[in-house]
Amino acid sequence: MKTLGVIGGSGLYDIAGLENVREVALDTPFGKPSDSFIVGEMEGARMVFLPRHGKGHRVLPSELNFRANIYGMKKLGVERILSVSAVGSMREEIKPGDIVVPDQFIDRTKGRVSTFFGNGIVGHITFADPVCAELSRVLYESGQAVNAGIHMGGTYVCIEGPQFSTRAESKMYRSWGADIIGMTNVPESKLAREAEICYATIALSTDYDCWHEEEDDVTVEAILEIIKSNVETAKAIIKTAAKRVTEERTCSCAKALENGIMTESSMIPDKTKRNLDIIIGKYI
């Protein structure tokens, strides 16, 4: 059975409609994930759900243990991750309430650990196209099927947070070509690629950030109001995508590490080999 992972962002703390549900608490070599994983079945797919910020929204973007979250998904057999994220719009045509399936990221985070490598092993991945094109297409077509206001493609600038941007920063990101702005998809997407997991984003537009001077500046209250309706649409997209995703993966994500490990196997410390076995084991 195909296995999909769903990482729920702001407002998405559970998935309705799962059958044969069980809760799985994991520890990893990188510490504890954001919360327990909820494992079940939906529309012919096995599904693994994780609330990114924990139940009750307890974890700041800067505090997220991205490595533990992705490692846990890998350990539970996930091959594709649908990331749900609240974002601000940097474009007039992306209205609050719309959904974007981005295809590029700009990393403006500070000090987050963005790799499984280190501790005696060096690896490099290709990241020119940071999301899975096949999975993104499924999300876009699923959004169309449920009549969502959805946009295919776009650049997501990921900032550190938890503060929103200054007006000067917001205008600068627009000049760089950013279409949406958020705080969580990096390094999540980088780690998913290292773990050879397909990754795509359902980005829920909640506001116009602060560049749009004819609109009110972003507030938490306004964001929460939009999120309520956006999350229901995201759930409908996920349910539709679960039916449409094929079992076999033909994209390059599945072999992202095939030629990426630089360190000779005999030189990799045993502890590092054990910790990364589910990621690198087939290559060393």
Image: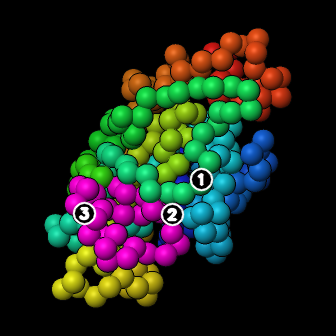
The circle on residue 112 is: 1
Could you tell me how far apart the alpha carbons at marks 3 and 2 are, in whole angstroms? 17 Å
Q: Amino acid at mark 1?
A: Arg
Snapshot quadrant of residue 126: top left
**Mark 2: few/some/many CA within 10 Å (<14, 14-19, 20+):** many
- Of labels 1 and 2, earlier in sequence is 1
Task: Judge from the rendering whether residue 73 lies leftward or rightward of residue 273; answer left or right.
Answer: left
- Of labels 3 and 1, earlier in sequence is 1
**Mark 3: few/some/many CA within 10 Å (<14, 14-19, 20+):** some
The kind of secondary structure element at disc 3 is helix
The kind of secondary structure element at disc 2 is loop
Q: Which residue is mark 2?
A: 160
**178, 45: nearer the viewer:** 178
Magenta stretch, residue numbers = 156-185
Establish if 225 lies above or below 227: below
Q: Residue at x 80, y 23 (%)?
A: 269
Task: Judge from the rendering whether residue 64 lies leftward or rightward of residue 251; answer left or right.
Answer: right
Figure quadrant of the C terminus: top right
Do residues under tags 1 and 2 come within 8 Å of each other at their CB atoms? yes
Snapshot quadrant of residue 147: bottom left
Q: Amino acid at mark 2?
A: Glu
Q: Magenta span has 177?
A: yes
The circle on residue 174 is: 3
